[in-house]
Image (tube, helix red, strand yellow):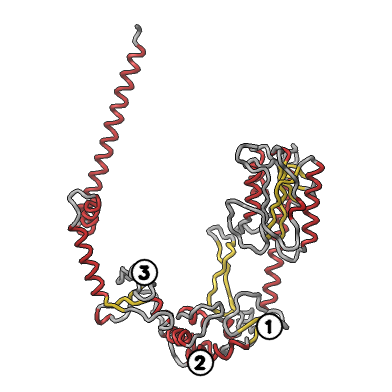
Amino acid sequence: MGPGRRAYRVSIATIERPATRRENPGTSHVPGIDLTQFIDDVAGCRPEDLADIYVRRSKPKEDLATLTKHAWDMVEAAHREDRKVRAVWWEQRSASKTYVRRNELEAAMRAVLEGYSKTLYVRKLDRFDRRGMETVGSMLDELDKRTARLRVVKEGLDSSVPGQRIIFAVLAERAREEAQDIAWRTQEGKDAHKALGEWQGGVVPYGLERDPDHKGRIRHRCDEYLVVREKIAVPLLNGESARRVAHRLNAEGIRTRNGKMWTATTVAKLAHSPLWAGLLPDRERIMDEHGNPTGRWKHHGRPYMDDKGQTVSVGPGVITKGERVIIEAKLASRTRPEGRGKRPPEYILTDTLRCGRCNGPMEGGGMLGRGGRYHCRTWSRQGKAACLGVITLRARVDEAVTAMWWSHISALEPGDAALDAIARRWVSIKDPEKDARRKEIVAELDAVKARISKLDHDHYCEASCRRSDTPA
C-alpha cells in the first residue's frame, strides 16, 4: 500500500442517519450489530489480498439477524478466496430509484477504485443495484480499468472471469424489471387505499394526529384541538387576516408544534391544507426533464377526488368542508390577483437594511401615500412578541444611501477601475446605442490584433522553414 494510506479503515452508515457525504468515514454504530466481528487484521496486506463488503436493505422490515447472516456469507466467501475483509459498508437505501443517492455504495466503490482493496463483495446483484445493465455495466467498466472486481456471492459471479459479463447483463435487467413491478404494485395499493379513505402518511396539521386504532385515519389531538379551533379557525372564519392571527398567537405565548413562532405563511398553509378539514389531500409527483420521477412531490392544496368526483374523508378535521370553502374565499379576497406581470423593484434595500432591535432583515411595504417605508420583517411576520420593530420612510433611506454613494464616488481618483466601471455602466443605461457601438469597435480591434499576430507567426515560421531547407 502507498505511503500515507491507512491499512485499517471501517465505515458503516448508521441506518437512521440522513444521506450526507462523509469525506473521512470513520467507525459508526448500527444498533443491534457488533460490526467489528466482520473485520480482519489487515496490517501489512496488499490491496490484492483485501476486500470490502457491501450490505444493503431497502426498509427496516428486513431484520438485522438476516442481514448479519448475509454479511457472514460474504466474509466466508472472501476467506475461501484468501481475502481479508478491510471494511464493511452498510446502508438503508433503495437501489431502484435514480434520484436516491447511495452514499455508502459510492464510498465503497471509491475505496476499491482508489486501490484500498481490489474486491467488492455483495450477496446478490439486486442488493448492488436495480437500475439495469447500463448502470451496472458502467461500474464494471471502472472496476476493469483498475484491475479490480465485483463478486456476487449468491449467484457465484465474478466480474474478472471472461464470459460472465452476459450473465451480469441478464440478472441486472431482471432486477430492473422486478423493481418496476414492485413500484407498479405499490402504486396500485396506494390508489386502492385512497379509494377506501385511508391517508398514506405525511405531516399531520396542528390540532390533529394519527388515529392509532384505525389505519390511515386521523383524529383530534386533545392538547391542540381547542387552541387551534378557538385561536385560528374561528378568527379566520370571522375574516381576520393570517398575519393578525399569527401575531396574536405569538403574543399569547402559543408556539407551533416544533416550538417556533407563528407567521402569516404558517397560518395560511394550515388553512389551505385539505387534511385540516379532514379531507384526503391530493399531490403530484415532480418529474425531471425526461419524465422520470424525482422523489419530490408538489402539494396543490386541494383535496383528492375519487372516480365519482367526490372528496374523500379521512376523519374529523379542525374545520368542516363548508368552513374550508369560507376560509379559502376570505383568504383569496386578500390576495393580489395574478397576471399583472413582474413589477420593477421598488425597495432595493430589502434584506440589506438590518433592524436595530433584533438585527434581522428589513423589507419594504406600506405607507404608499408617503412613498413607502421599510420595516422589520420579524416584527411584521411574527409580531411584537418576537421584536418591537423598527419603521423608517423609504425616502429617508434613499436620501442617506445616495449621500453615501456620492461621497464614495467623489473620493475616487481619475483612472480608478471602479470609477471606469461605473462610467461604462452609466453610458450603457443612458446611451445604449453608443455603448453597443463601443463594444463593436472593441470586438473589431481584438479581431485585427488576432489577425496581425497570426500573420507575424506565419511570417516567422515560413522564414525559419526556408532557412532550414537551404543547403549549407
Quadrant where the image shows the N terminus: top right
- Residue at 20% in and 66% down: 403
- Residue at 63% in and 62% down: 17
Q: Position of residue 170 (x, y in %)?
A: 74, 48
Count neighbours of disc 3 (C-alpha within 10 A) and say few if under 14, some if 14 to 19, many if 20 or more: some
Q: Amino acid at mark 1?
A: Asp
Please report contact status of discs 3 and 2: CB closer than 8 Å, yes or no.
no
Q: Marks 3 and 1, how far apart in space?
A: 43 Å
21 left or right of 386 in image:
right
Going from the N terminus, do you reach mark 3 or mark 1 first? 1
**Mark 3 or 2, closer to the camera:** 3
Q: Which residue bears the numbered disc 2?
A: 234
Count neighbours of disc 2 (C-alpha within 10 A) and say few if under 14, some if 14 to 19, many if 20 or more: some
Count neighbours of disc 1 (C-alpha within 10 A) and say few if under 14, some if 14 to 19, many if 20 or more: some
Residue 211 is marked as 1
Q: Marks 3 and 2, how far apart in space?
A: 34 Å
SS at mark 3?
loop
Q: Amino acid at mark 3?
A: Asp
Going from the N terminus, do you reach mark 1 or mark 2 first? 1
Q: Is residue 304 visible?
A: no
Q: Which residue bears the numbered disc 3?
A: 351
- Residue at 17% in and 58% down: 410
Quadrant where the image shows the C terminus: top left
Q: Marks 1 and 2, how far apart in space?
A: 24 Å
Q: Amino acid at mark 2?
A: Val
